[in-house]
Image (tube, rainbow, N blue to C red):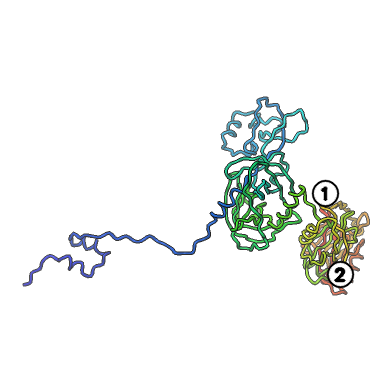
Amino acid sequence: MSKIGRPTLKTVLKGTTVAGIAAVMLSTGIPVHVYDSFAQPVTVNAPQAPSFADVVSAVSPAVVSVRVQSDATPVSDNSGNGFSFNFGGRGFDELPDDHPLKRFFRDFGGQNGGPNGGQNGAPNGRNEQRADKNPTRPHHLRPTAQGSGFFISEDGYVVTNNHVVDDGSAYTVVMDDGTELDAKLVGKDSRTDLALLKVDANRKFTYVKFADDTKTRVGDWVVAVGNPFGLGGTVTAGIVSARGRDIGSGPYDDFLQVDAAVNRGNSGGPTFNLNGEVVGINTAIFSPSGGSVGIAFAIPASTAKDVIADLQQDGKVERGWLGVQIQPVTQDIAESLGLAEPKGALVVAPQDNSPGGKAGIKQGDVITAVNGEPIKDARDLAKKVAVLGPNKKVDVTIWRAGKSLSVPVTLGNLASDDAAKAENSPTEQTPQPSSEKALASLGITVAPSEDGTGVSVTDVDPDSDAAARGLRQGETITSVNNQDVKTAADISKIIEAARKDGRSRALFQVESQAGSRFIALPINEG
C-alpha cells in the first residue's frame, strides 16, 4: 500500500502558467512567493507632425492688435450724471441678458429699462452715439473696431484691413509684449480692403516680409496669427484649401482660402508659410454661426505687396480704368455670339465719357485680349486693366458681329471710388396689352415699350428657358444679337436669321431696375 502524502509545490505548479498561480493558491492553500510583473506602456514610433513653434516665436513680435476709435458725441446730455455707457465697444442691448449691469438697469432703471430709462428714443435703453458737427457739444473718442495687423518695416509701417480702420479717427497698436503705441493712418484702399498705418517711435521693430505666393500650393501648411475676439496674440494652423476664390466683395477678388481657425478680430492679421513669410492677409470668413467653420479668405501677398507699396509712396492707389460694365461669357452666350469657347468679358454697356466708350467699344462686344494677352473672364479683365495703370495706351481685342477687331484705348485713372460707379438709370416701362404678341417658342410675351426703346416683357412662361435664365415680367428687351429691337417682329426676324446661320442661341440684352445684363436663350425649338 503506497503512502499518499501532501502534494509538493513542484507537483502543483508543473504545467501551470503564471497566470494560473492565483487559482492554484486558492485550491491548495500552499503559500507561494509571487514576483511583480507589469505590462510596458504603449509607445508608437510614427512620423511626427511638424511643430509650428519656431515659426511662431520668430514672427509673433511682428504681429500686433489694432484698436480703432472714432470721434463721436452722445445723442443727448439729458442724463446729467456725466456717465457714458460703453461696454468694450458694445451697446447696452448687446450685453448678455444675465450681465449684472443689464439686470441692474432692468430692475432699477427708467420706465423702459436700461441706462437713463431709455431716454431720447434709444432702443432698449441703448445709449447711442453719433457724429456731431456742433462744436459746442463735447466730443468723445469711443472704441469702434479692433482687429489685427503686422509690421512690414523696422521703422513702423503696419498693414491691416481697410474695414478695420474705416471711419476711425485714432489708432492704437498693441504689441506682443503688451506695449501700446499710437499710430496714424497713411492710406487705405477699399477695393482690396487694405490699409497702412505708421507708428512713430524711437526704436526698431521686428518685421516680416511678403512671400512669393505664386509658389503657394493647395495643401501647403499655413499659420494664422492675430487678435480673435480681442483675446490678443493667438495662433492657429491649417492648410491652403483653395486659390483664386471670388467671394463677391469687389472687382479684384482673388482670395486664398485657408482652413486655419480665423474669427472676428483676426481681420488684417497675417497668414504665414513655414518660412515665416506672409502669404496672405486674413480679411473674411464664411460662417453661418458667426465663428470659425474652417473657411477663411486671405488677400494674396502678391496683391497686397503692390497696393501697400502705392499707399506707402503717396497714400493712395491709382489704377487703369477702361470704363465699361462687363459680365462673364457663359457657354450659352459664347454659342449665341459664335465664339469657340466661353472666355473673355462681355460688355453690357460703356459708361458715359469713359475711355472705352470714347474709343468705340460698344455694348455686346466681347473683350478677348488686352495687349495680346488673352482675357479669361470679366474678373481677369478688371485685374489686368488695373495693373496697367492710368494714361497707358493699350490695344483691346474685341469680338463683334462674328469678327475679331483691335481697338486702341488710352486708359483713364481709377484713383477715386466714384470713377468706378456705373451710371445706370433704367426707366421702368409700362406695358401696353393692346399691342401684345406671343413669341411662343421663347415662352415670352412682349409689347412695344412706352418710350419706343426696346420691348416690354409682359408675360413669361414659368416653365420656359427664359424664366430659368432670370427673365421677368416688367423687364425690357433692348437688343437681340446686338441689334436694336422695337417690336416682336424685330425679335422674330433676328432669331430666324440666327437659325439660318446655324446658331442655337440668341443673345438678349435686358434692362431692369437693377441695371442692364445679357442672357442667352435657346432658339432651335419651334
Q: Position of residue 515 (x, y in %)?
A: 83, 54
The reply to whether residue 111 is in sight is no
Quarter of the image that includes the C terminus: bottom right
Residue at screen point 79% across, 57% down: 386
Image x and y of residue 27, in percent: 20, 62
Q: Position of residue 257 (x, y in %)?
A: 65, 58
* Residue 33 visible somewhere in the drawing: yes
Amino acid type of the residue that numbered disc 2 sits on in the rendered structure: Ser
Q: Earlier in the sequence, mark 1 or mark 2?
A: 2
Q: Pointer 1 and pointer 2: residues touching (CB < 8 Å)?
A: no
**According to the image, label 1 marks what residue?**
418
Left or right of 160 in this view: 512 = right
Q: Using the rendered view, name the quadrant where residue 91 is placed.
A: top right
Residue 335 lies in what quarter of the image?
bottom right
Disc 1 to disc 2, how far (Cα)?
32 Å
Please give left or right for residue 100 compared with residue 31 in the image: right
10 Å crowding of disc 2: few (<14), some (14-19), many (20+): few
Q: Position of residue 343 (x, y in %)?
A: 78, 67
The dot on residue 404 is 2
